[in-house]
Image (spheres, grey):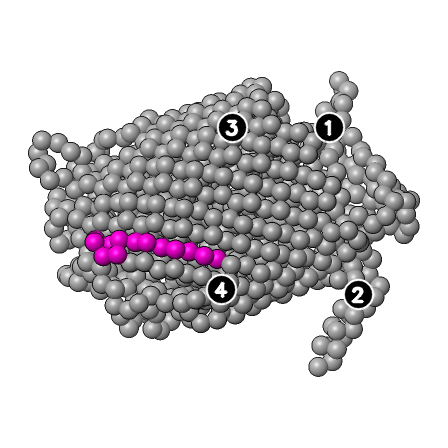
Amino acid sequence: MKYILLFTLFIASDFSFAKQQSMVHVEDGNNKEPLTGASIYWEGSHIGAVTDASGMTMINEPPHYPANLIVSYVGYQSDTTQFKNFTPHIHISLVEAILLDATDVTGRKKDSYIKTFEPSKIEMISQNELRKAACCNLSESFQTNASAQVNFEDAVTGAKQIELLGLKGIYVQNTIENTPALRGLSSSFALDNVPAPWIKSIELSKGTPSVRSGYEGITGSININYKEPEDLGPLYLDVFANHTGRLEGNWISSIHKEKWGTAFFANGAMTKDKRDRNGDSFYDQTQVNQVNLMNRWDIHGENFESKLLLKGLHENRISGQIPNENLSNPYQIGIKTSRIEGFGKTGIFLPGNLNRSIGITTSGFWHDQKGNYGFNNYDGTQGSFFGNVMFESAIVNTGHTLFTGASIMYDKFQENVNGTQIDRTDIVPGLAAEYTYKYLDKITLVAGVRTDFPNRFKVQINPRLHFRYEPKIGTQIRVSAGRGFRIPNVYAENIYMFASSRSIDVQETPRYESAWNFGANLIQEFKLGNINSNIAIDYYRTNFTHQVIVDVENADNHVAIYNLDGKSYSNSFLVEWTLNPVAGLDVKLAYRLEDVHQTMHGELMRKSMTSPHRGLVYVSYKTRDEKWMLSSNMNIQSKTRFPLSFIGDKQAYSPVNAQLGAQVTRYQGDFEFFVGGENLLNIRQKYPIIGYDNPFGSNFDTYQVWGTVIGPMAYAGIRFNLNNKK
């Protein structure tokens, strides 16, 4: 009891005596990249701070006003700005210094980093990091990341799912600029529908996310930030091709004025690989034609900012057996998708010294998908709307902040499964509140709760807690705990069910899914001689209280769908070591353990097609003159258990799979030229399709895929960026 009283007195004293703090963001004035380690201090005082990897920091207000804030960074001209009163947000752009002939000063920015002052461990993946591998879309954006992995759902449709904490990406809150996206009917193919050259950065967070952006999210969140007009030059062009018939190109153009800007994006992609390398009569790759178009507007006023975005997609997918004169009735898959989506966001900064603001967000999409899968058919249409009104204000000083919000999620589904029409409407209004406490740069505590009122289920109350403690510079400790829930979309999220001979047996009406997630991580920076290094250790556990089980373990050629009756959990452990042996050289070594179990037909079983052991080796080197970049990554996964799907099956496991890729990039003015290769170790799954010789028979299955049938793959590309804004 006495410790609670002491903590209460500590908080109360902070309310009374703590200084107000300003958030300072320091960036490169040319390319808008954050400057890590910039020095900030009030002239004539001992009050100062240093920016983190995101270019941000908090600084106490000066003893008196007016006061001069001085910002300096190696290789840049120092900046001095006078402030006559307290300013909650300070944005400083530094200009590179004019160097004398005898001077050689360079500053280096990280291409991926962890946001230092966030209570959650948020991994930032920048556009520069994405260009270090064959990254044409979002599904290929995690090749150098140890936390997340993207896997094929089956061997024929091309459907992919991201995996986080050992669980499918449906348990991740997917957002675009903090608005819900890539959900519902789009979940199986959405990762292929976001062009990587359009991405400014990806924020990946493990554990239950903040309550601010909606109710979804159990294992973490992935937020995609598209490039804004101010990030772009007037023209960007690129083209990518590989030797297996994939061709992709992007065009981006922007106009940027003092108070507004607009950007236009166009993407075209196709795969025309009609080869059958393993002789199973099936296409080795899904044939894809895809067009993406997007336009965004950013408007800035003295006390407000608005963002508008509209995006359209059309895609055709063809797979199955390659037609020829020997196949009178080939097994064919055809999927057509059309989608329109957009959002509008407005933030209003209220007058006063309490850092108050109001935010209004609306977003929505219309998604139409029609597909035939051999003898199965699945068509679906989804109309979705999300609205969110938010208010945020400091309480007495910026060490204490309160957020409140009200939201509504509306989804209308129309699905046709083999001639059976299934319609439903989900309306989920919700209320959210979140309190943030900050003590200098040492402690951050975020306590939030969401209460949502789904029309088809009972009221959902989801508390969430995030805590960060920095006992000394270079050591960060974080813990998190919280509950999340979601409404499943069983057919759209498990497209692989249709691409097999299994009959679909819905034994129970699917309910909502919910789980508790608990996690902790430690980041420790240290030196090995003169080598900068850090180690990160994570552990997360997810316990499901409600879950929809999609069971292919019943050994009777069925897919059984029912609600969880028993235990279902995931344990995830990660240790990651990064170091910089010499200037320009980055090395990352990581090991991840995933322990995932589900109760299926009364038995607690290790989840099939999930490798318990994963490894990553990643090396990147950029020459001192910044003319060349060399990078290589190897992702290793241990054997994985195959499901017992058919009568007479004996337990079997895949071999160890190691995928090695490498790339060389040459920078020449406004151009970048790159060549690379994937699967350089030539590790292949010879026959991923079971029963390929009789696809309309009772033992046809495309689900048991652990690798590619394609051997080493070579690729090359060119990027042109006018004004060289990278």
- The kind of secondary structure the magenta stretch mainly shows is strand
Q: Amino acid at mark 3?
A: Ile
- Is residue 614 left or right of 588 when viewed as pictured? left
Mark nearest the camera among 3 and 4 is 3
Residue 589 seen in render: no
Q: Residues within 10 Å of mark 1 (few under 14, many from 20)?
A: some
Q: Amino acid at mark 4?
A: Gly
Residue of label 4: 484
Residue of label 3: 252
Mark nearest the camera among 2 and 3 is 3
Q: Amino acid at mark 1?
A: Glu
Q: Earlier in the sequence, mark 3 or mark 4?
A: 3
The residue at the point 79 percent across, 70 percent down is 12
Residue 238 position, x and y percent, is: 47, 25
| Of residues 500 and 393, the one drawn nearer to the viewer in this rendering | 393
Residue of label 1: 96
